[in-house]
Each structure stands twice: as structure tokens, then as C-alpha cells.
Amino acid sequence: MALIYPFRAYRYNPEVAPFDRVLTQPYDKISPAQQEKYYAANPHNLIAVEKGRTSPQDMPQDNVYTRAAAALKGWIAANAVQQDAAPALYAYTQEFTVPGTSTRRTRRGFIGAGQLEDYANNVVFRHEHTLSGPKADRLELLRHTHTHTGQLFMIYSDPEKRVDAILSEVESAEKPLTELLDEYGVTHRLWMIADPALVAAIQKAMDVSPAQRPNTLAAGMQADNKFIRAIRDNTISLTTLTSGVGSPPKVNVIPSVAEATLDCRLMPGVNAAEFISEMKARINNPRVTIERLNDPVDAGVSPADTPLFAALRAAVLKEHPDAVVTPILLPYGTDSVNLRKRGVTAYGFEPMVLDAATVATMHSDEERIPVAEFLRGIHIFYDVLRSEF
């Protein structure tokens, strides 16, 4: 099953931001009328982040997403939103009335960080059809705020109810940190689970050892594959490390200075200056200085509803009928950056099937591509160029 982790949540400070004045429904349940009601309720209302107002004058430098990021940053500075001191899981209940009856029921769960899994790993399963528009909207909000303001709703198998027992213990031991009756008559309650023993017990109940997991991953696409990690996280690679005294360096002299070069590849929307500031904070050593050698480049995005993308899809499916053709985020730079700046649609395209061993050689001194896959890729390129896109 899933790998679950505690995290340091940001929560509203009720002394500055009363819960009943600042919390909202999820973004996809908020009507225009509710949006205005939330805006009028309190200057710290989550609506400014969760589903902010748009404007005809919106531009890349000032839009619903940049304003959301600025609002959240301002609330943290004003102490309206505070980060918990220690990593924790959070017990969460919703007490509601069954429609058409007077019966009250309680839905119980917990909030935590989870390891991102490839669907092929049979750990996380799709449970509904999701639309591209809302997904793009939520992703853009995440890129700007670096914060999840809403959780993914998931169910899990626990026939022995081990997790429920722990959650019930926490709920009966103390009052909730948050309690709110919403406009639909649902009472929401939240408890912190910071006790390492309880956190570990929930993690154990949720996890199944790798040996027990279905072994259905295609070669080269494991969840711990370096390429998969590189398209979902910021990455740092040590590429050079130099030191020594004299030329050639003396083997019996301890140098006082060393220099390292790091290849840092940041996710879209990540501010390079803030990233460096975080590195400095984590290193926490005044003797270490950090210098940025290159300015970050906004690579832009090419849409997937163009004739060119359709031609790419057709050419791939001709060679690989069972393939799923979808855009991905490439963790490296190409000439597409300059083309997109000039309004030209461009895609990074590598029509080759590479196994894990081949992928592992990328950017190494043994980098290679099998001849058969290279030739197959040429045929696919040829089919694209022949099409009338």
C-alpha cells in the first residue's frame, strides 16, 4: 500500500483569523455567490488562494496565481497562518446528516503526505475521470504557492481497522485543534498526531513491503527511477569537486578551501533566489558561499491540442499501437525554449523505448542508445515529417 509521511502543516491562527471567517468549501464547490461571500468575510479568507477572482487585465506578472502566492506569503508574515513546529499526521472527521433522514454519521480519515507512485505499481488507483482544465488550474496554483490548499480524497484498505483505532484514540484523548460547522450543516474537526509512536503505527498499517507488492512495473519506469524523480522534484547533482594546495596538489597538505559545482534543475514556477536561500539555510554555515553561475530560463509550454502533436501521436501509435502518448516535463533544456519565445510550437521528442539499464547511462561516460531503437526512432521521425500537419 501507500508510503505515508508526517509533514509540518500551515494552519490558520484563530486569534488572528477565526475559522468560521476564513475557511471555505473546496474550489470546485464554490459558486460565484459563495466566492463573493467568502471575500467579504475576512481579509485572510482562503478564497483568495483557493479560488481567487480573475480579471480581464490579468497578465503573466499579475494574475490569479501570482495574487494567491502573494496573499499566502502575506498571511504567514502577519501570523494569520502558522506552520506547526513538528511534523505530524492529522486526524480529520466530518459529521453530517444522512440526506432525507435525521441520522447523523461521521466520516473519519487522516491527512498526510504520500509518496508519489506510478499507476503501474498498483499502489494508487484512479477512481474517477478528471478533466484537463481543472488539473491545469490546480497545478498552476501549486507551482506559484508551493502549497496544497486542498487534499486528494483517497480511500484505503484496512480490514482490521488498525488506523481507525489509532484515530479514535487520538480523538478521545483531546479536544480538536479545529472545529467548524459549515454552511451545509457538516461539522469538521481536526486533531494533530505528532507522537512518533502513533505516526509509525499508522505508517506500518498503511505500508506493504516491496516483496508483497505486485511486480507489474515496466522496465525503466519504477517509481524510484531517476528520470521519474527528475520530472516531479527539484534535483541537485554534484558534477565537479576541486580542492588541493599547489600544482599538482600536495597529498600531505590539508587544503583550507574547496569548490563544488552543482547542476540544479528546478521545477517550473520555482524561484531560483528562494531556492538558493533555502540551500543556505539548510547548509547553515557562514564559511560556505553560494554563487549562481547561470540564470534560470522559463522554458514555456507547448499545448497538446495542435496538428503537430496529433502527427507525433499518430506516428508513435503506428510503431507502438499500445502506447499512451502524453506530454511530460523534460528535466533539461533544449532549443525549444528559443522557438517558443518566438511563438513556434515545439516539443522535445524522443521516440525510443529505453530500458532501465540504458536510462541509467544518460549523462555518464557510458551514455548509449541501442542501434535498433535509434533506427526505430528515425522511422517515427520520418513519418512525422511526411504527415501534413
Image: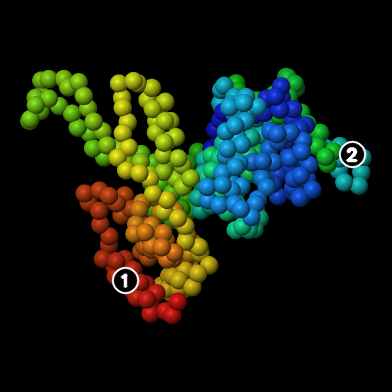
Quadrant of the snapshot with the C terminus: bottom left
- Few, some or many C-alpha atoms within 10 Å of disc 1 (few <14, some 14-19, many ≥20)? some
Separation (CA) of disc 1 from disc 2: 65 Å
Tag 2 residue? 103
How packed mark 2 is, by other alpha carbons closer than 10 Å (few <14, some 14-19, many 20 or more), is few
**Image point 59% across, 48% down: which residue?**
63
Q: How many marks?
A: 2
Q: Quadrant of residue 338?
A: bottom left
Q: Position of residue 293 (x, y in %)?
A: 30, 40
For label 2, the SS is: loop
Tell us which disc is closer to us: 1 or 2. 1
Give the vertical position of 102 relative to 323 (above or below): above
Rendering quarter of residue 97 = top right
**Residue 267's x, y, as percent?**
45, 45
**Amino acid type assigned to the residue bearing label 2 in the image:** Thr
Identified at 56% across, 22% down, the residue is 86
In the rendered structure, the answer to whether residue 177 lies left or right of residue 345 reads: right
Is 177 displayed left or right of 316 in the figure? right
Report if residue 225 is visible in the image: no
**The one of 229 and 219 positioned closer to us in this rendering:** 229
| Residue type of the residue flagged with mark 1 | Ile
Q: Is residue 9 left or right of residue 29?
A: left
Q: Is residue 28 above or below residue 79?
A: below
Q: Is residue 316 visible?
A: yes
* Closer-to-camera residue (21/124): 21
| Quadrant position of the N terminus in the picture | top right
Residue drawn at the location 33% of the way across and 68% of the way down = 377
In percent of the image, x 31 and y 54: which residue is there? 358
Report the residue marked by disc 1.
378
Q: Nearer the viewer, residue 259 or 328?
A: 259
Q: Position of residue 216 (x, y in %)?
A: 48, 53
Q: Looking at this rendering, what residue extends furthest in the front direction?
A: 57
